[in-house]
């Protein structure tokens, strides 16, 4: 398997997250399929399956965003960056990194506000909504790590 980063620990983290995301995909497919067949065959919708599939889907997307940050594989428009000078590329990298850090900090601050006294849960299964919202924090932590690696590469190695 081709290495996705230069660090062995980071590769293990990414591989573990890939496996978790794969399991979440399977979970989404199973729960959505159960609901489709339940509606088609029995004219009955499983409300719990919709809840679980939503939870799995949110975690899957946000973990995927974290992996994209760790591997610097986010979709980007590079039309101007490719034509820019190396100094301007570093400035673009710094500005984008600062914006990403600001977003991550707002996620951390917002999550702290959410969990202080927030006791809501999902209607059918009673899963605390903090389980759902904590996916944002995990994604933000992975993004901060990936963004820090990106900044290191920009300023130490000169690659933007």
Image: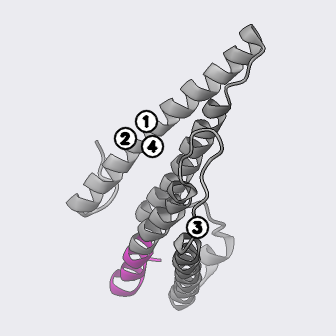
Residue 123 vs residue 90: left or right? right
Q: Secondary structure at mark 4?
A: helix
Decide which of tag 2 and tag 3 comes sooner along the chain. 2
Residue 67 in the image, given as x and y percentages of width and height: 44, 57
Q: With respect to residue 134, does 100 lie above or below?
A: below
Residue 159 vs residue 50: left or right? left
- Name the residue beneath numbered marker 3: 118
Decide which of tag 1 and tag 3 comes sooner along the chain. 1
Marker disc for residue 19: 2
- Name the residue beneath numbered marker 1: 23
Residue 117: name its quadrant.
Answer: bottom right
Mark-to-mark CA distance, 2 and 4? 5 Å
Residue 132 in the image, given as x and y percentages of width and height: 55, 54
> Disc 2 vs disc 1: Cβ atoms closer than 8 Å?
yes
- Name the residue beneath numbered marker 4: 21
Marker disc for residue 45: none
Farthest residue, direction left: 8
- The residue sitting at 57% across, 62% down in the picture is 119
- In terms of depth relative to the viewer, which is nearer, 122 or 17? 122
């Amino acid at each position: 398997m081709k290495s996705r980063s230069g660090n062995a620990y980071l590769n293990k983290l990414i591989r573990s997250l890939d496996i978790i995301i794969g399991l979440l995909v399977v979970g989404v497919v199973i729960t959505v399929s159960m609901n489709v067949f339940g509606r088609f065959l029995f004219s009955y919708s499983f409300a719990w399956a919709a809840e679980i599939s939503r939870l799995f889907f949110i975690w899957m997307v946000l973990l995927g965003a974290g992996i994209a940050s760790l591997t610097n594989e986010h979709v980007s428009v590079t039309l101007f960056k490719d034509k820019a000078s190396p100094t301007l590329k570093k400035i673009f990298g710094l500005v984008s990194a600062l914006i990403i850090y600001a977003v991550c900090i707002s996620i951390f601050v917002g999550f702290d506000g959410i969990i202080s006294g927030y006791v809501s849960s999902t209607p059918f299964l009673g899963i605390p909504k903090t389980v759902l919202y904590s996916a944002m924090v995990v994604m933000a932590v992975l993004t901060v790590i990936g963004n820090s690696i990106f900044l290191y590469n920009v300023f130490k190695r000169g690659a933007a």
